[in-house]
Amino acid sequence: MNKHKPMKKIILLFAVVLFPATLLAQAAFPGSELIGKWNMTFTIEDEELENLGLFRHGLYADEGFPAWMEVKLSGFSRMIGYYVGYEGSARPVSEVKFDEERNVYHFAIPPQWMNIEDDIYFEFSLENDYLTGFKILDGNRLQFTGNRQPSLERDTPPVWGAPKNLLDDHMSSWVIPENNQFRMIDGVLTNLGVGGNLVTKERFDDFKLSVEFRYPEGSNSGIYLRGRYEVQIEDNYGMEGNDLHIGGIYGFIAPSVNAARPAGEWQTYEITLVGRHVTVVLNGVEVISNRPIPGITGGSLNSREGEPGPLMLQGDHGPIEFRKLVLTPGL
């Protein structure tokens, strides 16, 4: 009966030895105050926009260009991360380095959707939870600032108000962009081709959204919740679902199943956003269940996550029709 007791002592001793090592792994090290999630804003002048081939999508002329970054601990003292720029999806950062002598951080990532050869280089400092720095993109030095991301946790569940119909013959709920291709045709909001994005005049905090939509073969669009989190719309029928496909939060959250219908058929979304937690029901199938969205997605209007934001319909990728857009706000 006593032959098992030494083993218990060994296990206990191993646990005692391991516990301090775990604490050491969590201990502060030079530069570790950067660990966390950050909302960033870039200043890009018109000349630089032209040089880089960028355009503002739904951005207002006086707005900066949003971005997002997460920095995580890997091992004892190595920092890794993820980055989302104004365009594209979340991409990994293999290492964020801290130059203790200069008191600056730096990292580099390869380009994603831009046809350039050099990696994109970032360099910045952190003081009083505020980032200031720059990135070098194809020879252009672009300044940015950043703040820690707010939690958006809610103390109580929302109380829902009266539903708002966002469709009418005059498109009165929307800011009409330059190069607008959206038209109301027989009660259906129709994007005829590649053009500007539609943004609601009203801004919302928590809400539920009911949508009926249809697209032709090969098309692509999206719905930006608060103008910051894209619920993907794309012709992905029959494919294996991922975080870039229909039903997903672009670049962050994959749908549990691909519930898409073939192109040309009407489809439905039921979307609930509370804080940063989202539930997505595609064609009657819950494909995302109350998951936290890590941060803004590419193409966002801004990175000010603590503020209410509009609904934005992506019009710069392809044709899409909406015959129902009903939003129920939280009070």
Image: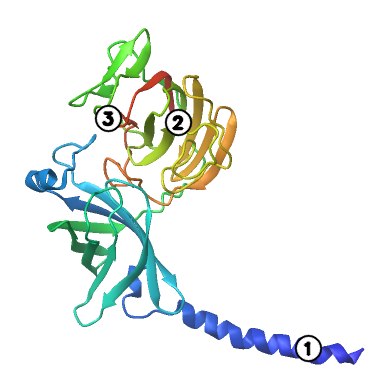
Other residues around mark 3 within 10 Å, as few (<14) / some (14–19) / many (≥20): many
Residue at image coords 27%, 27%: 194
- Locate the C terminus and report the quarter of the image it occupies: top left
Circle 2 residue: 235
User: Could you say where residue 326 lies in the image, as x and y percent from the top left?
Assistant: 43, 22
Up/down of 265 relative to 300, above or below: above
Looking at marks 1 and 3 on the same chain, the residue that comes earlier in the sequence is marked by 1
Up/down of 41 relative to 320, above or below: below
Q: Give the SS element for disc 2.
A: loop
- Locate the N terminus and report the quarter of the image it occupies: bottom right
Other residues around mark 1 within 10 Å, as few (<14) / some (14–19) / many (≥20): few
Tell me how far mark 3 sits from mark 2, CA to CA.
Answer: 19 Å
Circle 1 residue: 7
User: Could you say where residue 107 lies in the image, as x and y percent from the top left?
Assistant: 28, 67
Q: What is the quadrant of residue 108 in the picture? A: bottom left
Residue at image coords 28%, 55%: 111
**In the rendered structure, which amino acid carries the disc numbered 1?**
Met
Left or right of 152? Residue 10 is: right
Up/down of 127 relative to 196, above or below: below
Residue sitting nearer the eye, 237 or 316: 237
**In the rendered structure, which amino acid carries the disc numbered 3?**
Asn
Q: Give the SS element for disc 1.
A: helix
Residue sitting nearer the eye, 231 or 138: 138
